[in-house]
Amino acid sequence: MKTINDFDFSGKRAIIRVDFNVPLNDKQEITDDSRMRAAVPTIKKILECNGSVILMSHLGRPKEGPEDKFSLRHLQGHLATLLDREVLFADDCIGESAKTAAEKLQPGEVLLLENLRFYKEETKGDEDFAQKLANLADVYVNDAFGTAHRAHASTTIVAKFFPENKLFGYIMGNELESIDKVLKDIKKPYVAIIGGAKVSTKIDIIRNLMDKADELIIGGAMMFTFIKAQGGKIGNSMCEDDYLDTAKEIMDEAKEKGIKLHIPEDAVIADAFSNDAHRKEMKADNIPAKWLGLDIGSDSISKLSAIIENAKTILWNGPMGVFEMSNFAQGTISIAEAIVKATEKGAFSLIGGGDSVAAINQFGMADKVSYVSTGGGALLEYMEGKTLPGIEAIRGW
């Protein structure tokens, strides 16, 4: 399979599926442009190789056709600033305006198409819609890892019309290379840290890691489902009673496979879900009624940090506590610091999952770990061992 580095883009129009689903305020101003900035290297590579670029993306969730607040027109000016060149805009993605603008495109020029989701055919994976997109260009580049788990027209179906000329962009390539380092090309010892609120959303990842990780750390609210499954008292802490048996099965499987499963032994508890609540530290399996655990305790922080700092491969998916509240953020901060220390000593560290990414960014440590995934749902499904249609469309068709 050709890569973006060895494909000849000279004189060719490349249609790139980017993820420009960025947050906008009520004045339609971009409040976080990280997804746009991430796409710049792929775009610039093609332009530097004397190609032209057609960009397609969704924005938000328009319900019934075009809505101005979801128009990609609001991104045009900022994109021009990021690329340091004019960005042309087509007020449609498949109609005559898009077709005409694409035909006129010269090497070095950039065309931004209107929101793909103004057409329901996009999310339905409609083949005719995909062909109209494909007709605009000579080569297809998928650089939207965050949508790779969706079999939409622009992320998957369109690849059918480029049997030879279909490629991953730099974001997709870097994501896959980095994730494979914690799934396939693993250096031992491998520590996986799984946190967050619910066991139910992490079961498949945990089970897939059972054949890979040496040590598995469970944190966040989900730890209380495991603690209750062992007969512990968890007060009003969040717990999924329907998954108590599942938690027992996971603990038994870890023991059977020789994986060290670490569940925090102490917690910071509060008498209300509030940053201003009364709080104290105590054993995580002996929490009084009406109190709830909102972070891991200092003993657990010390023990888990030492384990992480000794690792050669680290996956972190999910915070240790309610880090959005400053009084319950120390566990998550400390885990992040331990990951940074391990990375400085040569470990490969991958941070993935919305809340973990938000945390590492909030603490200003994103540039001190090996890789921060943009994947979200796509990352979770890939780590669960599922085939992602957007990846398979490039690799396998």
Image (cartoon, grey):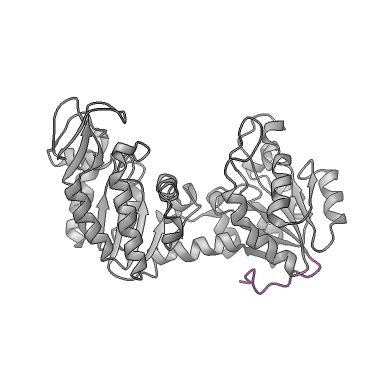
Q: Nearer the viewer, residue 289 or 325?
A: 325
Residue 80 forms part of the magenta stretch: no
Q: Residue at x 74, y 42 (%)?
A: 114
Q: Position of residue 237 (x, y in %)?
A: 23, 32
Quadrant the C terminus occupies: bottom right
Horizontal side of residue 61 vs 360, given as left or right:
right
Label the magenta part by its dominant secondary structure. Answer: loop
Q: Residue furthest bottom?
A: 6
The quadrant in which residue 60 appears is: top right
Whether residue 223 is visible, yes or no, is yes
Quadrant the N terminus occupies: bottom right
- Vertical order, 197 against 15 (above or below): above
Q: Residue at x 73, y 57 (%)?
A: 84
Count of residue discs:
0
Residue 4 forms part of the magenta stretch: yes
* Residue numbers of the magenta segment: 1-12
Q: Position of residue 283 (x, y in %)?
A: 13, 40
Horizontal side of residue 11 vs 251, given as left or right:
right
Q: Residue at x 50, y 60 (%)?
A: 175
Q: Position of residue 194 (x, y in %)?
A: 32, 50
Horizontal side of residue 17 vs 34, given as left or right:
right
Whether residue 397 is visible, yes or no, is no
Q: Residue at x 57, y 55 (%)?
A: 390
